[in-house]
């Protein structure tokens, strides 16, 4: 799978893909993440990519020309399944969406910055708009890292135990059950006896019950 990310601040994405699961996914050749510096595609002096908004108002807006130049350059060598703009007014990102996107071959993520991007680019080039939550952050880079991680770990072969992702929270609209490891007792706090029983059927039933109870308590909206 290939994920390209267009950003004004490429250095913000150095860390997230250089460690742990995302690093191993790339080393295995299962995932390719390419960060594209938007400033390399501008026609303006001093690598300018933003300007004041028409009509006045606070903030700066990323211009359409650098974005179009970058996207059209990338499209010369590959066809994208989705061109995604990361924006607070996009569709809320969730596990179901991550599952769907993980089945794609080529994705292009556009990171907003400053006050946003020229809306004409959204009208003519964007196929999907995604929000990671009802709040505003400085730019789309952190959102791109989150979405890439959520998608990448679902690619077959990325996780050492592929069944691990299937038991994650939200995969079946339930929160994951509590988990425990050694020691069996610590400061008088004991691991539930059922987990030590060796009876896998009863353990699975316990986990399902715990998931239902935790979801009902913490996220009853998921049960609706």
Image (cartoon, helix red, strand yellow):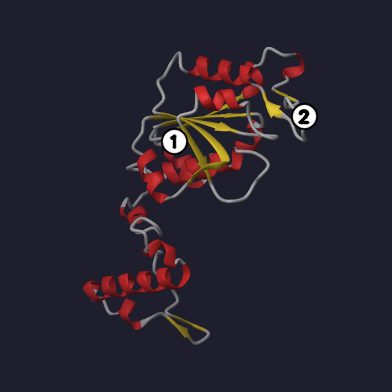
Q: Nearer the viewer, residue 150 or 83?
A: 83
> Which quadrant of the rendered structure holds the N terminus?
top left
Percent x, y of residue 98:
41, 44
Q: Is residue 179 visible?
A: no
Q: Which x, y percent locates residue 177?
A: 39, 69
Image position of 129 with respect to 215: above or below: above
Asked if residue 134 is positioned above or below residue 46 in the image, the reply reads below
Residue beneath disc 2: 56
Q: Which mark is residue 180?
A: none
Q: Residue at x 47, y 69 (%)?
A: 218
Q: Give the numbered dot on residue 27.
A: 1
Answer with left or right where residue 54 lies relative to residue 210.
right
How far apart are labels 2 and 1 at the CA level? 47 Å
Question: Left or right: where does residue 67 sit relative to residue 177?
Answer: right
The secondary structure type at the circle numbered 2 is loop
Circle 2: is it few (<14), some (14-19), or many (20+) Cα within 10 Å? few
Q: Please, what secondary structure does the residue beneath circle 1 have?
A: helix
- Which one is closest to the eye, mark 2 or mark 1? 2
Please identify the quadrant where the C terminus is shown.
bottom left
- Where residue 156 sits in the image (x, y, percent)? 32, 42
Q: Residue furthest front?
A: 55
Residue at x 45%, y 41% (from the top left corner) = 24
**Which quadrant of the view contains residue 15?**
top right
| Front one among 125 and 72 | 125
Q: Position of residue 151 (x, y in %)?
A: 42, 42
Q: Is residue 146 visible to the viewer in this orientation of the structure?
A: yes
């Amino acid at each position: 799978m290939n994920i390209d990310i267009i950003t004004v601040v490429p250095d913000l994405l150095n860390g997230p893909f250089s460690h742990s699961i995302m690093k191993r996914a790339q080393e295995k050749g299962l995932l390719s993440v390419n960060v594209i510096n938007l400033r390399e595609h501008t026609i303006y002096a001093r690598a300018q990519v933003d300007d004041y908004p028409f009509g006045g108002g606070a903030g700066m807006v990323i211009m359409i020309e650098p974005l179009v130049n970058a996207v059209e350059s990338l499209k010369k060598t590959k066809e994208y399944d989705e061109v995604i703009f990361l924006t607070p007014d996009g569709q809320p990102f969730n596990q179901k969406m991550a599952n769907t996107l993980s089945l794609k071959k080529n994705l292009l993520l556009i990171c907003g910055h400053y006050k946003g991007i020229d809306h004409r680019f959204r009208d003519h080039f964007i196929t999907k708009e995604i929000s990671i939550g009802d709040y505003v952050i400085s730019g789309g880079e952190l959102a791109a890292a989150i979405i890439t991680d959520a998608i990448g770990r679902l690619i077959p072969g990325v996780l050492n135990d592929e069944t691990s992702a299937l038991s994650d929270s939200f995969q079946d609209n339930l929160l994951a059950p509590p988990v425990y490891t050694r020691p069996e007792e610590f400061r008088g706090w004991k691991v539930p006896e059922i987990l030590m029983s060796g009876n896998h059927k009863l353990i699975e039933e316990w986990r399902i019950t715990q998931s239902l109870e935790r979801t009902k308590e913490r996220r009853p909206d998921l049960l609706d």
